[in-house]
Amino acid sequence: MSESQAEPTAEQVVEELRKVKVGELLVHTSSMLASLAYGKLAPETRDLAQAQLSIEALKALMAVLPEELRRDFNTVVANLQLAYADAAAPAE
């Protein structure tokens, strides 16, 4: 294994974490939660409890997201809630 492919040391990981801006991490985490929620609502991988948890976690993060992104994430949450309602509705 070459040195460039070696696992990072604990010190390297800590140094990289020091460079991360919390706002960027919140946006990344929010995007990941939205993606997870949509994935959990897909018919082939449906898990309504996990989808709901992702949606609720995303809603909880909304208050601390950068203000300029809140509107976009509000739209995402609204779309997820509609998709959840469709997925949870009894089949006709």
Image (cartoon, helix red, strand yellow):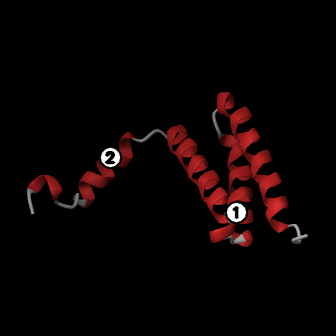
What separation in Å lies between label 2 and label 1 (alpha carbons)? 34 Å
Q: Secondary structure at mark 1?
A: helix
The C terminus sits in image quarter: bottom right
Which quadrant of the structure image shows residue 42?
Answer: bottom right
Helix, strand, or loop for circle 2?
helix
Query: How many other residues sit within 10 Å of disc 2, few (<14), some (14-19) or many (≥20)?
Result: few
Nearer-N-terminus badge (2/1): 2
Residue 16, percent across and down?
32, 46
Residues 6 and 13: in front is 6
Looking at the image, is 46 positioned above or below residue 82? below
Comparing 17 with 37, the one in front is 37
- The residue shown at (74%, 70%) is 48
Above-or-below relation of 68 to 36: above
Q: With 12 as the anchor, is 61 left or right in this view?
A: right
**Residue with the most extreme front position:** 92
Question: Which residue occupies 73% across, 71% down?
Answer: 49
Residue drawn at point x = 61 percent, y = 55 percent: 33
In the picture of the structure, the residue carrying the numbered disc 1 is: 41
Does 20 appear above or below 6?
above
The picture quadrant where one finds residue 68 is top right
**Residue 21 spot, x, y in % from top left:** 46, 38
From this viewpoint, which residue is outermost toward the left? Answer: 2
Q: Which mark is residue 73?
A: none
Q: Amino acid at mark 1?
A: Leu
Residue under the point 62% across and 61% down: 39
Give the percent coordinates (x, y) of residue 5: 16, 57
Which image quarter holds the N terminus?
A: bottom left
Is 82 on the left or on the right of 5, as rendered? right
Q: What residue is disc 2 on? A: 16
The amino acid at mark 2 is: Glu
- Residue 72, quarter of picture: top right
